Structure formats: C-alpha cells, structure tokens
Image (spheres, rainbow, N blue to C red):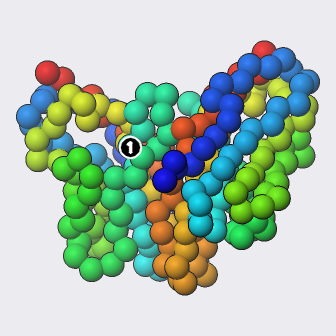
C-alpha cells in the first residue's frame, strides 16, 4: 500500500491567499484525521471524519479553516484567508476501526506551509 | 482533563547504552497507548501500542514499552541505543470513549544518541 498521501509537500503563500491541502487516506480506512504541528503548540488535532462524515471539528482554530471529505479516498483542508500564524506542518492520518477496537493511526508525510 | 505528559524535552544517550523515554497519562477508563517516532521532515511513524494483556509490549526497531497501570505510565525502552534512533518521540493515548479513535499526544521528547 502507498500509505497516506498528502499534497503539496511544501507550500509558500502570501497572507490573504487561499490555501488548499489535500489528503488521500489508506484504501479501506474509515477514519481520517487532520493535525497541525508547531513548535509552540506541538501536535493538535484539528478535525476528524468517520465514513466521510465530520465527527469532531472542535480543534479547528477559526472559521478561516474548513475541511471536507467528499468521498472515502479524498479530503481537503482549506484556509481562507491565510495568515502568517497558520504557518505549520499539517498532517493527515487515517485508521481503520474494527467494531469497538481502535486501530493505529497512520500518518502522511505532511505539508509544510509557510504564510508570508 | 485527559492528558499525556512527557516530562523530558530531550534525552541524551551514548550509543550502545540502554535508553528510556518517559510517558505518563491521565485519562478515565482503560486507555489504548501508543508510541510514534518522527524523523526530520517526515511524518509520524508508528512504533508500538498497548491495548490489553501483557504489560510489556514489543514494537519496531527493537523498541519496547512497559504499561504500568498503578503509575499510569507507558515508558519507551530499548536495551542498546543506535545513533540512527535519534529522533523525536511522541507518546499518545486514545481514551476509551464510545469507540472513537481520537488520539491525545504528548509534547514529544527529542532523543539524541551520541557515538
């Protein structure tokens, strides 16, 4: 399996621009997670989906952030408008739940975002 | 509040010596516990997990971790460190809450193995 795929790997943009990050989970996984990693705040869970439905978006910083999962093999995280404080590494992860057993989350390589 | 603590920002070890990276947690119920490793400019890689059963869990690259319920700890260990083990290590807990897969991560511990 190719693992979790994220694109782009690096993104440099100017403040005020729209940024779209993309994720393809591992085939067959029913959970998808978006995380943000910064030096100051560490790893933060932004939002997660189960069977394409958003379950918990309490970690999304503000209305400028939105996430969608139109189908089981694709998700986007959008920031509009972007601000310098959004600069971070954004990770996507996926996992498979078998009944009540919570399985391991597998992470993508991340998107390094720099907002100037 | 549910949380994970990694009390050491950095651990320094000489190559060939045993290493321990500490983790304690505070959650209700019976948690699932995980260790992940992050190499520079890479995503997090799964090392091992504890669900139930034997308190000593063996994982990838010779790592193991010991679950201690009374001390609410899940320390990562390796008998003989390698320079290539130098990386950032994260402990994580998945609280038992209705089958959701949410992970709570510690702040991370940087492991530096010196030749």
Determine the image quadrant of residue A29. bottom right
Q: In this orientation, which residue lies closer to the viewer: A83 or A21? A: A21
Quick check: A25 above or below A17?
A: below
Quick check: A42 above or below A27?
A: above
Can I make out residue B9 in this image?
A: no
* SS for callout 1: strand
What is the quadrant of the C terminus of chain A in the image? top right
- Residue under the point 33% across and 58% down: B48
Q: Is residue B7 left or right of residue B43?
A: left
Q: Position of residue B85 (x, y in %)?
A: 26, 35
Q: Position of residue B11 (x, y in %)?
A: 27, 34
Q: Is residue A90 left or right of residue A97?
A: right
Determine the image quadrant of residue A33. bottom right
Instruction: Report the number of discs.
Output: 1
Few, some or many C-alpha atoms within 10 Å of disc 1 (few <14, some 14-19, many ≥20)? many
Q: Position of residue B76 (x, y in %)?
A: 26, 52
Q: In this orientation, which residue lies closer to the viewer: A46 or A100? A: A100
| Direction front: furthest residue | A1
- Residue under the point 58% across and 52% down: A93
Q: Is residue B75 left or right of residue A18?
A: left
Q: Is residue B61 left or right of residue A61?
A: left
Can I make out residue A36 in this image?
A: yes
Q: Label 1: chain?
A: B
| Direction left: furthest residue | B16
Residue identified by numbered label 1: B37
- Residue under the point 48% across and 34% down: B42
């Amino acid at each position: 399996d190719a693992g979790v795929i994220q694109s782009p790997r690096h993104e440099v943009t100017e403040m005020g621009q729209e940024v779209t990050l993309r994720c393809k989970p591992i085939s067959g996984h029913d959970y998808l997670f978006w995380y943000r990693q910064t030096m100051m705040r560490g790893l933060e869970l932004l939002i997660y989906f189960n069977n394409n439905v958003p379950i918990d978006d309490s970690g999304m910083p503000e209305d400028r952030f939105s996430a969608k999962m139109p189908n089981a093999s694709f998700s986007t995280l959008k920031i509009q408008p972007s601000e310098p404080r959004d600069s971070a590494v954004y990770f996507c992860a996926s996992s498979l739940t078998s009944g009540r057993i919570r399985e391991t989350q597998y992470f993508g390589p991340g998107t390094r975002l720099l907002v100037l | 509040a549910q949380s994970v603590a990694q009390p050491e920002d950095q651990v320094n070890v000489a190559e060939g010596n045993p290493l321990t990276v500490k983790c304690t947690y505070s959650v209700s119920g019976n948690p699932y516990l995980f260790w992940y490793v992050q190499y520079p400019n890479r995503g997090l890689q799964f090392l091992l997990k504890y669900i139930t059963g034997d308190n000593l869990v063996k994982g990838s690259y010779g790592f193991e971790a010991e679950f201690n319920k009374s001390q609410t700890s899940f320390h990562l260990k390796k008998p003989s460190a390698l320079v290539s083990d130098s990386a950032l290590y994260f402990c994580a807990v998945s609280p038992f809450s209705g089958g959701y897969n949410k992970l709570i991560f510690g702040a991370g511990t940087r492991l530096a193995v010196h030749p």
